[in-house]
Image (spheres, rainbow, N blue to C red):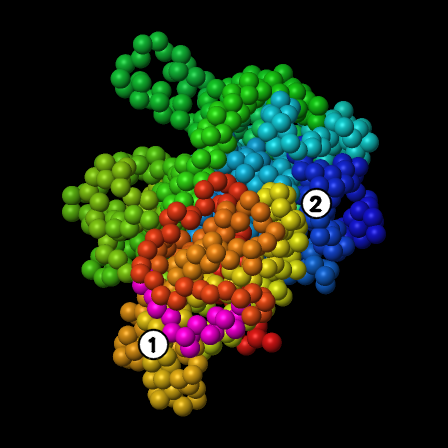
Amino acid sequence: MNIENFYKELLGFTPYKYQVKVAELLLSGKNVILSVPTGAGKTWASIIPFLFSMQNNNDSFPKKLIYSLPLRTLTNSIYSDVNEILDKRPEFEKLASIHTGEYKNDENFESDIIFSTIDQTLSNFLSFPLTKSKRQANINAGSLIGSYLVFDEFHLLDTKLSMATTLGTLKILKNLSRFCIMTATLSNDYIENLQDALNAAIVHIDNFPEDVKIISSLRIPKNKESKKSVTVVNNVISAGDIKNKHKNKTIVICNRVEKVQKLYNELRSFSELDTTKIICLHARFFSKHRKEKESLLKNIFGKNNKTNAILISTQVIEAGMDISCDTMHIEISPINSLLQRAGRCARWEGEYGEIYVYDILDKAEKEILEIENPESDIKKQIRSIKNKYLPYDKELCEKTFEKIIKVKYIDKDISQKLVNDILSEKEKSDFIKIKQKEEGYNRKLIKNSWESCEKNNYSKTIRDIQNIDIVIIDYEKEKNKIFYPYKYETISLYKWTFIKWAKEIQENKNEDDDCIFTAINNDDSIFIDSFAIQNEGFQLNPISSIDELKNCYDIIFVDKSVLKYTKETGLELGIGSRSSPIKETKQADEESIVFKKDTFLEHNEAIENCYKNIFKPKLEFAFNQLNILWKENIDWDKLITIMIYFHDYGKLSNRWQQPMQLLQKLKSKKDNSFSYSEDEVLAHSDFNIDVDSEIEQRSKVRNKPPHAGVGAFVFIEMIYEYSDDFFSNLNDNTISISNCIATAILKHHGVDTISYPDFEISEINYKEMKNLLNSLTVNVELIKKERMGKLTDNLPDDYKEWLTYLFLARILRLCDQKATKDISKFLK
């Protein structure tokens, strides 16, 4: 089946020419930068090549797709849309998962298709995953190696942070992954800069005039001069404007939440409007209500729904959501944002839309800005007026307003001209800075993140955190108790908006009022997300000054008396009556720690079978690309097997075996359904943390030494003497690749491990390792006794070694986890 027929069979339509071109380029080994207007089908253009390759079992294309987007709302929407199609086909059912921090049904990035926010994708690759502990930091970094990476709505990324880091990631990965960058609103110059930096092929809609004629979001309806007319209103947006121009479907997009709430409340006061069909959406809702609203608007504003309705929102819906309207009201924003908003108007075939563009400031506010030498009180007012352009740049908004006022309608050519005229100069400057930053494209910061695995790298590489998480509480009820802060849902608020609210609250506060603001002592609070921490208790600490609020905390607990929340309008400043709801979360399986007994040989056999049956079938592309990277024809299958055999060598140590065997002996005496034999060399004992605390203490199993470093040390020492027995075809790369393997072994239980303890291995225990090595038909003698030491000289050095270590560490850690959790599943 060719790609055109595959499109027809899966989606029911003939693909556009540009979609076929994207598939041809990707499947022939090229990377792609795709620039097409909103609503032109770029999502499927990027996904179909992966599905086509999968169905045809193509080993020259990756077996995993990681689809990254800049916003949670957008990620949820596209995942839902794509999954609805995939689940109708048995071969693609349950193929996709989502990971946004809010939704975490695939924390280890194991699905064949993963929809993720850019924050999650990058933090995982940089080894500080936002939803995992530092101990687990290196598990997911290797998931990008050998994968197909899609970066959608690329223009929305932060230029100096997430965009630069994404480009640095792709430059470091080189050909270890395949990628597709997608955008609708970057200037032609910027796209060419991307092409030069990444050596990728550009697919631009301008090169496919036959598609332009038939793409429904571009086709002009009969008896119309354009598809979308533009009218610039030299005033601020009002509820009266919205009501008077409303027909069937109206979408209003404002820059600030407060304006959305104000317009929503005003519209609900008009008796001639059906208030049940007026929807307010922004970022200040609790999760349940936001999901309900997203689902509702996708239905009402989706294709073929004739319901009369008005949506008032912020920019959370401006990109990627498959919704449309006949009338749109938008506040001025930079041209790329404005065009994304316009993409939600007259999106489908036969539709005609009217777009009204409004200024941010009214005439009186503009006059204040023109005052020369203003006095101090006027200066404060001027600062407040200028802040109305936030979160956008004032000059870009003004420049966009100046250009858009000359436009009567929007089409593909006008859109691109506006982008080029308004953004080219700024984007050129931005790209120069990206090329120069931290060894170019944040590459030094990426390497530093691999080394430290610290979450504070987030603000240097992905997003400058300017928000505070708010939890509404009943302080009177909670003040004298142990408080469990992470059980509650939060609402993220721009830091300086909250400070403004706090000042107003403090000014109106009575002296005898109870405490309004509280915090907890936890420096990592913004990144906490695990179930264990959600159930950790803290003491609430009163905050008495605004300076404390400015400088100290990422999560604030505010008494319900000063913040108002409703499911209709979300969070507002005002007298409230409700506290934040408890998070909807499931207890993680690993929280109930239960191990089943397995021997050293059984454990290694299970891990090896897990690797061969689950991981190896999907790694052919990665193996081939790693060979190109190292310029060697490497037997990766053999190297991974050796890594598995050595990873638990330290468990053969007498100091490790003795308490584990005693624990198993005590367990069998406590319950004779559990077996014990003094001849068995154990990898794990039968153990349940909920019922075995007494025998755990008696066995002193918690005092056993760490084992990971022993295997790494012995492996490295063995290589110096027996490298030809193991790696006869590695030539000049033997030591480098051996260091990668050793580091994966060293850090297979935690990224901070850099040493090994004293160890001594008896001849009886050593025979277990000899039995493993016999399967490799090698005859070597390993070190059985040594004093403690460090392995810092063997850690990765250059990017090539770091990538290989991360690739190997992921395989080892996940196979180890799976085999330990369900030993019987993976034994022959």
Quadrant of the image containing the C terminus: bottom right
Q: Horizontal and vertical percent for residue 548?
A: 23, 40
Q: Which residue is mark 1?
A: 658
Q: Residue furthest top?
A: 372
Which residue is found at the position 43% from the left and 89% from the top?
A: 673
**Is residue 153 magenta-colored?**
no
Please name whichever residue, 170 or 362, is drawn nearer the observer in this view of the structure.
170
Q: Is residue 701 above or below residue 416?
A: below
Q: Residue furthest bottom?
A: 672
Residue 591 in the figure: left or right of residue 311: left
Q: Which residue is mark 2?
A: 44
Three-letter amino acid code at the position of disc 1: Gln
Quadrant housing residue 690: bottom left
Which residue is found at the position 27% from the left and 79% from the top?
A: 698
Three-letter amino acid code at the position of disc 2: Trp
Q: Return the mark for residue 392.
A: none
Badge 2 crowding class, 10 Å Cα cut-off, few under 14, some 14 to 19, many 20 or more, is some
Q: Secondary structure at mark 1?
A: helix
Q: Is residue 769 above or below residue 217?
A: below
Please name whichever residue, 462 or 334, is drawn nearer the observer in this view of the structure.
462
Q: Horizontal and vertical percent for residue 151?
A: 59, 40
